[in-house]
Image (spheres, rainbow, N blue to C red):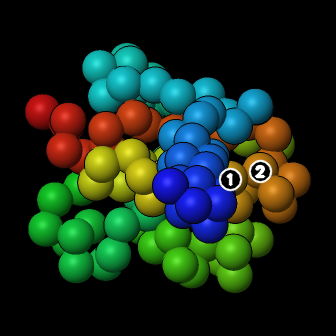
Amino acid sequence: MDTSTILMIIFIAGFLLWRVIPVKGIRNITTDQLQNELGDKNKQYIDVRTPMEYKGRSIKGFKNIPVDQLSSNSSSLLKDKEVVVICQSGMRSARAAKILKKQGFTQITNVKCGMSAWN
């Protein structure tokens, strides 16, 4: 293998690791754990899927703010209350959690596996 191929493999591996390694300060829970926490008035529940996905199937109490609109709509969220984010598989909600973290939110929970694991 030449040097450019090795560098490309290292870059891709690093990128993939960066995408899956949990960010410090973001809690990850399962859908079973979410069921035990639903209805907590001290938490804000955000579904970051598209409006069409949300309309098709959603969890009562979750507000729809698509991940691509989260940066511009995060002002509607309170920074002193925990934010619980969910999507279809856990990837967009993990991205949403990182966005919220960068915006100064300190209590963020990502639902792993998302709606695909919700019963």
Q: Is residue 109 above or below residue 30?
A: below
* The C terminus lies in quadrant: top left
Rounded to the nearest whole Å, what is the CA distance between mark 2 and mark 1? 5 Å
Residue, disc 1: 98
Camera sees residue 95: no
Total numbered circles: 2
Give the x, y percent position of residue 84. 54, 42
The residue at the point 58 percent across, 54 percent down is 6
- Asked if disc 2 and disc 1 are in contact, CB closer than 8 Å, the reply is yes
Q: Secondary structure at mark 1?
A: helix
Disc 2 designates what residue?
A: 101
Identify the amino acid type marked 2. Answer: Lys
Q: Give percent across and percent down for residue 112.
A: 39, 35
* Residue 54 rendering spot, x and y as whole percentages: 26, 67
Locate residue 29 relative to residue 15 in the image: left or right. left
Q: Position of residue 83 (x, y in %)?
A: 62, 44
What residue sits 68% from the left and 53% below the top?
Answer: 98
Which type of secondary structure does the marked residue at label 2 adopt? Answer: helix
Instruction: Name the residue nearer the viewer: 90 or 4.
Output: 4
Type of the residue with mark 1: Lys
Task: Report crowding for label 1: few under 14, some 14 to 19, many 20 or more residues within 10 A (C-alpha).
Answer: some
Residue at horizontal 57 percent and vertical 42 percent from the top: 17
